[in-house]
Image: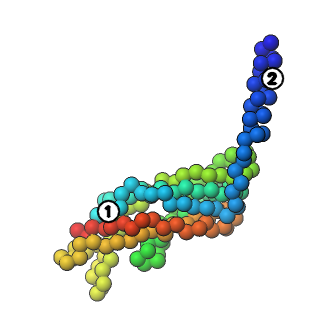
Amino acid sequence: MKQILVFILVFFLIFLTACSPKPDFPVIPHLEYTGMDKNIMIQGDLNSDSVFIYLKFTDGDGDLGFDANDSLPNLFVIDSRTGNIAESIKIPKLPDTGTGNGVSGEIELKLYTTCCLFENNIPPCSVVDNILFDTLYYKIYLIDRAGHYSDTVFTAPIILECK
């Protein structure tokens, strides 16, 4: 009797697995900005303040991330004020789900504060009496192991207090 119950249970699990819809994501990674924990930071260059940015991703062939011994970054954060890379981050290799139908998940990205930028050759991170705020947003994209670039997402504006 016990063997029959085990057989029925295994058959039922196989049936559920076979009948459940498998994701059908494109092989080009998709990135979606879902929010951040705050939109004001105090300027600084010593990691004195930070913001958490939340993203969702999908990738049809599941080839996101690199092995532990590989040092290549694959997630890039661009400062809108300069167009320069503010952060380049290595996403670890995601485990194979065994389905062959891609991966999806969420990323919580902690970005540390940056400096206010000024005109007239005033050094960044200065305190200027009549300039209280600077505003920026980040552009974020990722690259999978096949070299496919995701779409670029944009954060909401972030206000830097220049004090």
Task: Identify the colour scheme used.
Answer: rainbow
Kind of residue at disc 2: Phe
Residue 91 in percent (x, y) is at 56, 57
Query: Which label lies toward us, 2 or 1?
Result: 2
Question: Which badge, 2 or 1, is on the more N-terminal residue?
Answer: 2
Quadrant of the frame with the N terminus:
top right
**Compared to 159, does 21 lie above or below?**
above
Report the side of 151 relative to 45 (left or right): right
Q: Residues within 10 Å of mark 2 (few under 14, many from 20)?
A: few
Which SS class for mark 1?
strand
Residue 129 in percent (x, y) is at 18, 76
Can you see residue 68? no
**Compared to 22, does 158 lie above or below?**
below
Q: Which mark is residue 7?
A: 2
Residue 104 in percent (x, y) is at 62, 52
Report the side of 76 relative to 127 (left or right): right
Q: Residue at x 57, y 61 (%)?
A: 31
**Compared to 92, does 163 lie above or below?**
below
The quadrant where residue 74 appears? bottom right
Q: Which mark is residue 41?
A: 1
The answer to whether marks 2 and 1 mark residues whose Cβ atoms lie closer than 8 Å is no
Quadrant of the frame with the C terminus:
bottom left
Query: Nearest the camera: 34 or 73?
Result: 34
Kind of residue at disc 1: Met
Report the side of 90 relative to 109 (left or right): right
Q: Residue at x 33, y 67 (%)?
A: 159
**Compared to 104, does 81 lie above or below?**
below
The Cα–Cα distance between marks 2 and 1, rounded to whole angstroms, is 59 Å
Q: Residues within 10 Å of mark 1 (few under 14, many from 20)?
A: many
